[in-house]
Amino acid sequence: MKTKNVVLTMVAVMVASAFTFAATPASKVAVVNQNNSGVYKVIYEGATAGKVTLRIVDNKGQVIFNETKKGLSKFILPLNFTGLEQGEYSIEITDETGTQIQKVNHTFAAEATSAAAKAVHITKLQDGKYLMSASTNGNINVQIFDGNDNLVHSKNFEVNGKIAVVYNLKDVQGEPSFLVK
């Protein structure tokens, strides 16, 4: 009877430890391409804070980047592939739950389109005012719509570098929206 109890206790301990090990959630990794700009964002969320190693390996198997961080449970890291050869790269994230590999196919944009060449930022200020800033070389068109999607303003700008314009939209009905192209 004692032997049977000991065996049952051991089986229960093994089953409980197997469930405990299996219940450890895996880390989550996503790699997002930033508008074909050559910049990829690595988004990592681990089960617990600990040691995390990020490696980038080219299609020849050569490690071109290797970094280890300690005490992190999550991060967002931009990786700039500008200047690297076109091809497939592996982004490897290793933590206490194992290694996850995401593949990216880095290619050059054939020609930068005007939309990709712009960096546009809209900031809501006080009293119905908005700041529109852009960085580009070329023409842009700024269109502003009211809360009912009616066009309330349209203007073309020739930009050689940077531009910033403050719009007073306190009399616009609803929440205004901007379209910059």
Image (cartoon, rainbow, N blue to C red):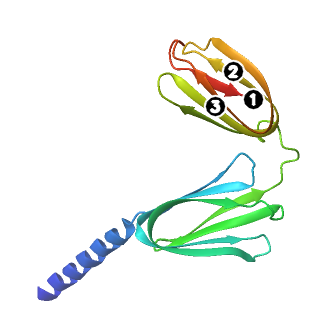
Q: Give the residue type that dot 3 points to.
A: Met
C-alpha distance separating marks 3 and 2 = 11 Å
* Residue for point 74% across, 20% down: 155
CB atoms at circles 1 and 2 under 8 Å apart? yes
Q: Is residue 87 above or below residue 156?
A: below
Q: Position of residue 53 (x, y in %)?
A: 55, 74
Q: Quadrant of residue 149?
A: top right
The residue wearing badge 3 is: 132
Q: Please give the label number shown on residue 143.
A: 2
**Which mark sits nearer the N-terminus, 1 or 3?**
3
**Which mark sits nearer the N-terminus, 3 or 2?**
3
* Residue for point 80% across, 65% down: 84
| Residue placed most toward the observer, 97 or 141 | 141
The residue wearing badge 1 is: 181
* Viewer can see residue 26: no
C-alpha distance separating marks 1 and 2 = 8 Å
Q: Position of residue 69 (x, y in %)?
A: 51, 73
CB atoms at circles 3 and 2 under 8 Å apart? no
Q: Position of residue 169 (x, y in %)?
A: 56, 18
C-alpha distance separating marks 1 and 3 = 13 Å
Q: Helix, strand, or loop for circle 1?
A: loop
| Residue placed most toward the observer, 163 or 80 | 163
Q: Label 3: few (<14), some or many (≥20) within 10 Å?
A: some
Q: Give the residue type that dot 2 points to.
A: Gln
